[in-house]
Image: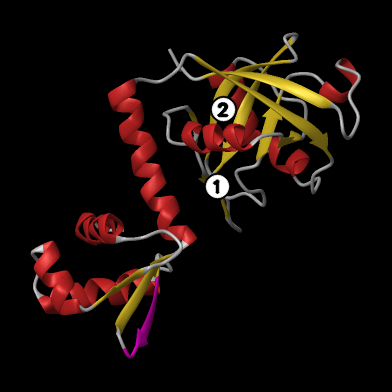
Amino acid sequence: MSPTLWDTLYKLSLLYVRDKGLMTSTTKLAETTGLSQQTVSRHLIMLERLGLIERQVTVRGEEIKISEKGLEELRKVYYGLKAVIEGVPKTIIFEGKLFTGIREAAYYMGLKPYRDQFLRKLGFDPYPGTVNLKLLSASDIREKKELESYPGIEIESYRDKNRTYSSAKCFKAKINDEVDGALIIVERTYYDASVLEVIAPVYLRERLKLKDGSTVRVEVFTRTD
């Protein structure tokens, strides 16, 4: 999304009433934003196409709602600014319940270009697959979203002759105060923000005697230095 388009989304958010939307017109928005009516109209069309807003014409005017996707874009910038202004905590503690995932992670974790990066950047060769944890509280989910805005240890994407494999971001972690590992945030994932994916050099289920439903504590180290 271009900076000018993001600026329009931001200005809409200043006028926006959560759950009620915004009843307005391109003329009023032009006066509020300082843009021409034509530019406002073009930006609204583009924001709608991107799925960042929803629009409906009514007898009272045009109703605009910022979609969940649009709110997520605003949150990303908010968390980034919060980190700059307030600083980044050294550690974040998460607790989640273990569950069996879709079982595709083992394949991706075993790919040599990824394994080489994990070994070089994290200092260990991960056991194939991830441990999936469902976060237990709304505050943990908010902190997970905030963590996603922090700079982490980048695992670069790569391409073979058939497809492109996505990038990821890691943060070193301590699992159940016992095992050193890492939290991994994959660029393209099947899971939402309520799920943590954790990797380690050992089979965590066996080492920590875990099973589905076990509560797991993960201390995440946010600094990469």
Estimate how packed mark 2 is, as few (under 14), some (14 to 19) or many (20 or more) residues with alpha carbons within 10 Å.
some
What percent of the width, then of the height, locates residue 73?
39, 52
Residue 15 is left or right of residue 66, and the answer is left
Dominant secondary structure of the residues highlighted in magenta in the image? strand
Nearer the observer, disc 1 or disc 2?
1
Up-down: is 206 above or below 32?
Answer: above
Q: 116 or 50, which lies in front?
A: 50
Quadrant of residue 183 in the image? top right
What percent of the width, then of the height, locates residue 163?
58, 57
- Give the numbered dot on residue 137: none
Q: Is residue 58 magenta?
A: yes
- How has the structure been colored for display? secondary structure
Q: 113 or 225, which lies in front?
A: 225
Up-down: is 156 above or below 22?
Answer: above
What percent of the width, then of the height, locates residue 53?
39, 68
What percent of the width, then of the height, locates residue 23?
30, 74
Residue 148 is left or right of residue 57, and the answer is right
Tag 2 residue: 117
Q: Which residues are magenta?
A: 54-59
What kind of residue is marked 2?
Answer: Gln
